[in-house]
Image: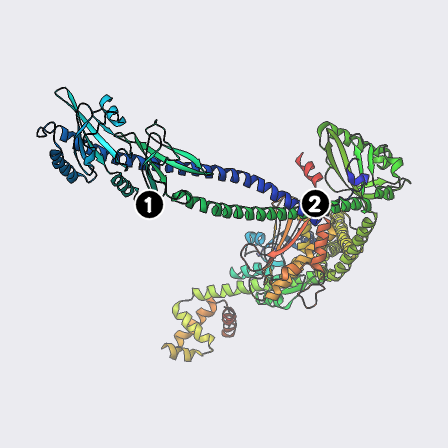
């Protein structure tokens, strides 16, 4: 079971930080606040779902630097960037860095909440996809080498006869492997197998 | 007041116009004095040397004459002595028969003549004085008795064995003289006599005279010439000079016919004759004549030279005197002029000059003092300063100050220009600038005060201040726009916080989940933030509002932090690295916060523009706050711009000088005047850390009250 998503708030202005926290909590979401980017990076656990609300202008370091650091450690936490001055170069850099939203202050509460909610949803989905992909990959690893060969050819849409010819096996033997592959991959048909494997491989 | 400047008595101008006559007299006096000083000793010396010289010459003349005389006398002595020896040898000759006959004598005579041609004849006398034998030119003399002849008597009676007679005529009536010798043979006295030719003696003497420098004569005891040079006379005449018998050798001067003739003499040993030598030409001969001739010429030359030197010296001296007189006259004129000027300055200056004694009783009061304070001199002198021109609220301090000075000799207000309030006779107070100097006069202290009425100046200063404030305001408004984005961000923070807090409240209320405590907390927070927003707005209004400067004790560090916050975003937007270096300790200064902010905003803006202008590069802006070396609170703004071009730094602080295309050229001059109004310092220099760029810095004096409070 996945833990509760948390909204991580990084802003050097205490009043703003606390207000964002109050707003988020009033929506029934968990929130944690940090006074600086470094404070957040030190405490961050990539396993924890949620999203990050990051003020682009922080004392000591820029919000964009925090974003860079998260990308470096391959954290997938969605980031909502807040900025007082929306200029093009900052927003381009922010989006390239994988920000999900780039909001110019002042941000009306509803807009912020909407952004937070969608970011959390995005995170949840991403984590689901990642989990599914991990499960399929794990099942593929449990196949015997022969079964994996048969599976690769099945994914390519080959018939049992074509597979038997390609692997110099009888059709009967191929059918046996096919049934084993479908069972081990927990799918009911070759079509389903193709979809799952391609989905798992598409983004890696 | 005893100085002349205040009594106002002009010094009478001494007449220093000295005429030519004065300097002619002076020259004459100098010349005469110098002549006396130089000529009297010179003349005395000349006389002394002249007489010395004469004496020496005279002495040498005398010695020379004596030497001549002695020499000639010796020669004659030798001559006579030879003749005597000839006769002695003859009379003692054992071959001479006695009595000899005339023939024998003839033989001997011829032998004598061979020895000396002087011998004329030869005779022999018997015991009775009869010439028994004779050889020579007068045979008639044979048989004559010479018994009564003086020379014969003298010879027989004398101790000497010979005698030389004077020249005489005798029996033969021609000049001659005789040498006779005697010998006693067998109890009889035999005498042998020979006549000598005086002409030979004359010749001999003349040969001794030499080159004719001297005349020589030979005299007997009576002064009768025995032999003489023709120039003087002839034989048997009497010489005008008869040498004394003693000393045997000597010299003497004799006046003959009005002129002095000098003689040297020497007595002979062989005869009672003396050789007399005198100069052949006593008028000119020897060193005496030459010296006498040269002396007046040399002396005259020396005298003339000395005279000219004296005249020249006298003239020179008078010229120097004239010069120094002129200089002195000019100095005195200058001095009079400057005294007059001083008097005029004191009398006409805007400054009132007031003197008082150590008790504060007025002793001096010039015309300006009257016009400034309204009191006429007659009424105010003798009164106390504290009863007249010192305003009531300062009287006690004034009296304390006098007492303090009397006790310690110290006065904090002395010798400084100080602004004070003064009291006019009509009761109104007005600002004055005053400088009081104590002067010690014969043990008593006198205070001199120069007082100027600065009412006008104060007014002008106030107006300038007003103008300055207006100018600063205009400029502040014109630059406030640059602060806007910073202020907007600053305002955004509380507004955002309020919005979220309130929205959270609304959410809680809507959902019915919120506890009352939570809601109150959120609302209180929102309220606090709203106040904060209000402060920011208020500050912004202050910034652009036209207002009088308001001095407060503020922390310069906090001020810099605040301004940096406002500007930081804008700076970073320009892709400029911003570094703020503020110590943890507060730096308290008395200042108008808005004005100081204005200065800092201006400096940071300038730095940003300079960095932008420089293009790519370090692009760093650094603001530093700290205590300066001279104990002031200092803010430095360093940029990495292109730095100051030569000649720019001097002009930067001038009004309307700008290097920016759209600049007003007002920022730096106003910044400077603001800082100077805070008694601070302001400078713009190239960076001192070796990097390219400019450092703008200003320093404000630390608040002494806050300092001492902190120290406790």
Q: Secondary structure at mark 1?
A: loop
Q: Secondary structure at mark 2?
A: strand
In the drawing, does residue B299 fall left or right of residue B593? left
Between B480 and B139, the one lying in front of the other is: B139
In the drawing, does residue B667 fall left or right of residue B163? right
> Which of the numbered marks, if any, corresponds to residue B457?
none
Q: Residue furthest top?
A: B187
In the drawing, does residue B501 fall left or right of residue B132? right
- In the picture of the structure, the residue carrying the numbered disc 2 is B589
Q: Residue furthest right?
A: B426
Between B139 and A180, the one lying in front of the other is: B139
Location of residue B235 (image quadrant): top left
Using the image, name the chain to which the residue with label 2 belongs. Answer: B
Using the image, name the chain to which the residue with label 1 belongs. Answer: B
Location of residue B575 (image quadrant): bottom right
Which mark is first along the chain, 2 or 1? 1
Q: Residues within 10 Å of mark 1 (few under 14, many from 20)?
A: few
Image quarter where the N terminus of chain B lies is top right
Horizontal and vertical percent for residue B137?
Answer: 20, 39
The residue located at (70%, 42%) in the rendering is B703
> Which of the numbered marks, if any, corresponds to residue B212?
1
Horizontal and vertical percent for residue B538?
Answer: 78, 53
Q: Are marks 1 and 2 in contact (CB under 8 Å)?
A: no
């Amino acid at each position: 079971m996945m833990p509760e998503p948390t909204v991580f708030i990084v802003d050097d202005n205490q009043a703003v930080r606390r207000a964002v926290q109050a707003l988020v909590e009033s929506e029934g979401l968990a929130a944690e606040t940090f006074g600086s980017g470094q404070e957040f990076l030190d405490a961050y656990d990539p396993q924890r779902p949620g999203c990050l609300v990051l003020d682009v202008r922080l004392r000591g370091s820029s919000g964009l630097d925090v974003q860079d650091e998260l990308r470096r450690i391959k954290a997938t936490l969605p980031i909502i960037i807040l900025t007082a001055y929306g200029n093009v170069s900052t927003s381009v850099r922010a989006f390239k860095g994988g920000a999900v939203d780039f909001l110019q202050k002042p941000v009306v509460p509803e807009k912020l909440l909407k952004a937070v909610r969608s970011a959390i949803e995005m995170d949840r989905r991403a984590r689901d996809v990642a989990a599914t992909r991990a499960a399929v990959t794990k099942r593929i690893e449990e196949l015997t080498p022969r079964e994996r060969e048969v599976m690769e050819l099945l994914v390519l849409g080959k018939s049992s006869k074509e597979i038997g010819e390609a692997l110099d096996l009888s059709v009967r033997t191929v059918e046996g492997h096919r049934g084993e592959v479908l069972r081990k991959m927990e799918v009911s048909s070759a079509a389903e197998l193709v979809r799952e494997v391609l989905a798992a491989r598409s983004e890696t | 007041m005893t100085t002349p400047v205040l009594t106002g008595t002009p010094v009478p101008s001494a007449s220093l116009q000295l005429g030519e006559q004065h300097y002619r007299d002076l020259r004459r006096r100098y010349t005469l004095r110098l002549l006396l000083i130089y000529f009297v000793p010179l003349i005395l010396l000349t006389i002394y040397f002249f007489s010395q010289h004469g004496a020496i010459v005279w002495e040498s003349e005398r010695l020379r004459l004596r030497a001549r005389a002695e020499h000639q006398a010796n020669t004659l002595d030798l001559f006579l002595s030879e003749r005597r020896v000839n006769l002695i040898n003859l009379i003692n000759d054992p071959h001479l028969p006695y009595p000899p006959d005339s023939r024998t004598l003839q033989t001997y005579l011829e032998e004598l003549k061979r020895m000396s041609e002087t011998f004329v004849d030869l005779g022999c006398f018997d015991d009775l004085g009869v010439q028994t034998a004779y050889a020579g030119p007068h045979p008639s003399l044979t048989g004559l008795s010479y018994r009564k002849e003086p020379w014969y008597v003298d010879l027989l009676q004398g101790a000497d064995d010979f005698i030389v007679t004077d020249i005489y005529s005798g029996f033969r009536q021609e000049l001659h003289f005789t040498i006779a010798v005697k010998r006693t043979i067998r109890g009889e006295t035999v005498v042998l006599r020979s006549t000598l030719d005086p002409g030979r003696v004359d010749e001999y003497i003349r040969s001794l005279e030499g080159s004719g420098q001297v005349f020589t004569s030979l005299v007997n005891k009576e002064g009768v010439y025995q032999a003489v040079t023709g120039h003087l006379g002839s034989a048997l005449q009497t010489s005008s000079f008869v040498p004394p018998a003693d000393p045997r050798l000597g010299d003497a001067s004799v006046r003959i016919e009005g002129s002095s003739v000098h003689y040297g003499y020497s007595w002979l040993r062989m005869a009672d004759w003396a050789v007399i030598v005198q100069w052949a030409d006593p008028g000119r001969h020897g060193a005496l004549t030459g010296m006498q001739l040269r002396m007046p010429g040399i002396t005259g030359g020396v005298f003339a030279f000395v005279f000219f030197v004296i005249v020249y010296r006298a003239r020179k001296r008078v010229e120097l005197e004239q010069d120094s007189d002129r200089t002195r006259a000019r100095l005195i004129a200058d001095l009079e002029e400057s005294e007059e000027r001083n008097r005029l300055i004191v009398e006409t200056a805007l400054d009132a000059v007031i003197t008082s004694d150590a008790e504060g009783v007025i002793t001096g009061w010039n015309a300006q003092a009257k016009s400034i304070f309204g009191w006429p001199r007659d009424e105010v002198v003798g009164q106390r300063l504290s009863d007249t021109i010192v305003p009531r609220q300062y009287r006690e301090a004034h009296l304390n100050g006098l007492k303090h000075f009397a006790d310690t000799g110290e006065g904090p207000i002395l010798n400084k220009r100080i602004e004070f309030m003064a009291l006019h006779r009509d009761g109104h107070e007005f600002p004055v600038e005053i400088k009081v100097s104590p002067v010690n006069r014969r043990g008593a202290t006198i205070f001199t005060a120069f007082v100027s009425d600065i009412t006008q100046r104060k007014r002008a200063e106030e107006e300038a201040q007003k103008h300055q404030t207006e100018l600063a305001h205009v400029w502040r408004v014109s630059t406030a726009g640059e602060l806007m984005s910073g202020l907007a961000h600053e305002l955004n923070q509380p507004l955002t916080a309020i919005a979220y807090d309130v929205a959270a409240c609304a959410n809680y209320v809507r959902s019915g989940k919120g506890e009352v405590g939570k809601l109150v907390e959120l609302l209180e927070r929102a309220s606090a933030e709203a106040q904060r927003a209000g402060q920011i707005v208020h500050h912004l209004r202050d910034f652009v509002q036209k207002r009088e400067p308001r001095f407060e004790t503020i922390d310069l560090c906090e001020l810099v932090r605040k301004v940096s916050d406002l500007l930081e975003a804008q700076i970073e937007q320009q892709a400029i690295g911003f570094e703020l270096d503020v110590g943890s300790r507060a730096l308290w200064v008395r200042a108008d916060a808005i004005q100081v902010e204005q200065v800092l905003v201006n400096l940071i803006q300038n730095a940003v523009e300079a960095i932008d202008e420089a293009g790519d590069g370090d692009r760093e802006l650094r603001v530093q706050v700290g205590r300066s070396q001279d104990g002031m609170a200092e803010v430095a703004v360093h940029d990495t711009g292109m730095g100051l071009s030569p000649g720019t730094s001097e002009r930067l602080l001038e009004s309307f000088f700008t290097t920016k295309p759209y600049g007003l050229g007002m920022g730096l001059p106003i910044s400077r005047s603001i800082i100077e109004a805070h008694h601070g310092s302001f400078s713009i220099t190239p960076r001192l850390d070796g990097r390219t760029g400019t450092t703008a810095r200003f320093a404000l004096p630390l608040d002494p009250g806050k300092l001492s409070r902190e120290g406790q």
